[in-house]
Structure formats: structure tokens, C-alpha cells
Image: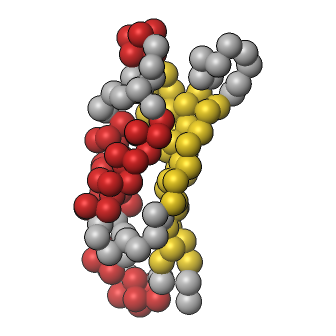
Amino acid sequence: MKGWIELSGMRFYAYHGCLESERIGGNEFTVDFRCPVSPSRAAESDSLEDTLDYSRVYGVIAGQMKEPCNLLETVACRIAASLEKEFPQLEHFDLTVSKKNPPVGGECEWARVSISK
């Protein structure tokens, strides 16, 4: 049996961006995480030790969101590297970092960067 673990719509107020106004005023960001799992062992044992601990994944992501940087690409790659370090058993995952109302000179609801390991 195969499945997915997803943490979708994790919301953060952070200070990422190239513009001084973004670094001072901040903005709303969301992060989505998804990884394939084989749920059989966890379903059988009903034990957290046999699955991916969602709260630890969230903690890694939240920690990286607190560290300002210029680009969404940098944020996404830093999160990915931290997840790889904390969870070496993860062979594959998808990650999307989204910035609400990015300063693009026109109407744009979200800017997103998605990566896959």
C-alpha cells in the first residue's frame, strides 16, 4: 500500500523579500509539503515512531521561515536542506513556498516556488 503525508496551507508571517518594505513590514506566506509513504507499518502499530512526525516537519519549516532572505528560491531550498538533514529517511518530497500579493507592479494573488527532492 502506498500513500502520501501532506501538510497543506501552513501559514507564516515572515520578512522575506528583496525590497526594504518587505523586510520591514513582512508579508503572509504559505508552505505546502508532501511526501510519499507506505502507511502499512504505522497503521499496524498505531505508533508515531512508525511514521513521519508532522509536528517535527512543521517545526523545521517554521524555523526556516523565521530567517529572512531575499528570494523564495532561497527559502524553499533552505527548508528542503533542513528537512533532508532532520529526516534522512525521506527519499522524495515536494515543497511549495508561496508569497501573498508579491510586489510585481500589478495584480498578483500569489508568487510560488515549488521544488522536489
Name the image colouring: secondary structure
Q: Exactly how many numbered labels are in the figure? A: 0
Regarding residue 36, the answer to whether it shows in the image is: yes
The residue furthest right is 107
- Nearer-the-camera pick, 48 or 32: 32
Is 49 left or right of 9, judged from the image as shown?
left
Residue name at image x 36 percent, y 36 percent: 65
- Nearer-the-camera pick, 71 or 64: 71
Answer above or below: position of 24 versus 90.
Answer: above
Answer above or below: position of 85 versus 105.
Answer: below
Answer above or below: position of 7 versus 44.
Answer: above
Answer above or below: position of 3 versus 71.
Answer: below
Regarding residue 55, the answer to whether it shows in the image is: no
Q: Position of residue 3 (x, y in %)?
A: 56, 78
Residue name at image x 38 percent, y 60 percent: 54
Q: Position of residue 84 (x, y in %)?
A: 32, 62
| The N terminus - image quarter | bottom right
Q: Position of residue 63 (x, y in %)?
A: 29, 41
Q: Quadrant of residue 52?
A: bottom left
Residue name at image x 25 percent, y 61 percent: 86
Q: Position of residue 87 (x, y in %)?
A: 29, 66
Residue name at image x 39 percent, y 16 percent: 23
